[in-house]
Image (cartoon, rainbow, N blue to C red):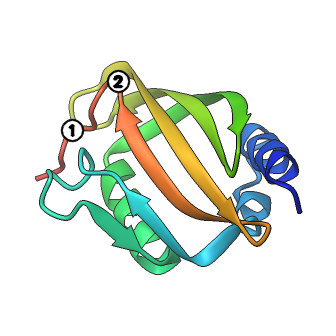
Amino acid sequence: MPVGEVARRYVEAYRAGRMDRALTLIDPGLVRVAPAETGGERTELRGLPDIMANAERLTADLEIHAVTADGPFVGGDRFAVRFTFDQTHRPTGRRTEATKLSLYTVAGGAIVREEVSYFDPPTQPH
C-alpha cells in the first residue's frame, strides 16, 4: 500500500475513534521515539506492547474529551499528523489542551517508526 494511502487510512481511523483500524496499519515492531513521554530516560520504545503500556501510563489520570487530527502531510516515505487533545487531569480537575506532532515512516505498507514532538509536553505521572 502506498504511503499516501496508509496515511489517509490511519488519520481517518483516528478521527473515527477506530483505534482497532489504525492498529492494523502499524507494524508490530514499531519504534516510537518520544523522549518527552519518558522523561528523556528512554528515547525509544519498541513494539506495540511497550508502546501501548506507555500510552496507558500517560493517560491513566486523564479524561480525553476530544482529539483532532490535522493532516496527513505526506512526503516521500513519511507523513506527519498534528494531534490536539482536549483533556482533563482527573486528580486536579484542570482541563487543558495538549498538542503533539507525529512524524511516521512507512515501509512495506505499514507504519514502522513514529517520532513524536510535543508543543505541550505531557505531565509525568508520579
**Image position, residue 31 (x, y; %):** 45, 68
- Whether residues under marks 2 and 1 lie with C-beta atoms below 8 angstroms apart, the answer is no
Q: Is residue 46 above or below residue 94?
A: below
Q: Position of residue 94 (x, y in %)?
A: 28, 21
Which mark identifies residue 64?
none
* Amino acid at circle 2: Phe
Q: Residue at x 56, y 29 (%)?
A: 82
In the rendered image, residue 36, in percent from the top left (x then y), is placed at 24, 44
Query: Would residue 23 appear left or right of 89 to someone viewing this image?
Result: right
Question: What is the CA distance from the residue labelled 2 to the residue labelled 1?
Answer: 12 Å
Q: Nearer the viewer, residue 21 or 114?
A: 114
Q: Residue at x 80, y 61 (%)?
A: 21
- In the drawing, what numbered circle is on residue 123? 1
Residue 84 on image: x %, y %: 52, 26
Query: Residue 123's image quarter?
Result: top left
Assign a secondary structure to mark 2. Answer: loop
Residue flagged by tag 1: what amino acid is it?
A: Thr
User: Which residue in the protein does label 2 denote?
Assistant: 119
Q: Is residue 65 left or right of residue 34?
A: right
Crowdedness of circle 2 by 10 Å Cα count: few (<14), some, many (20+)? Answer: few
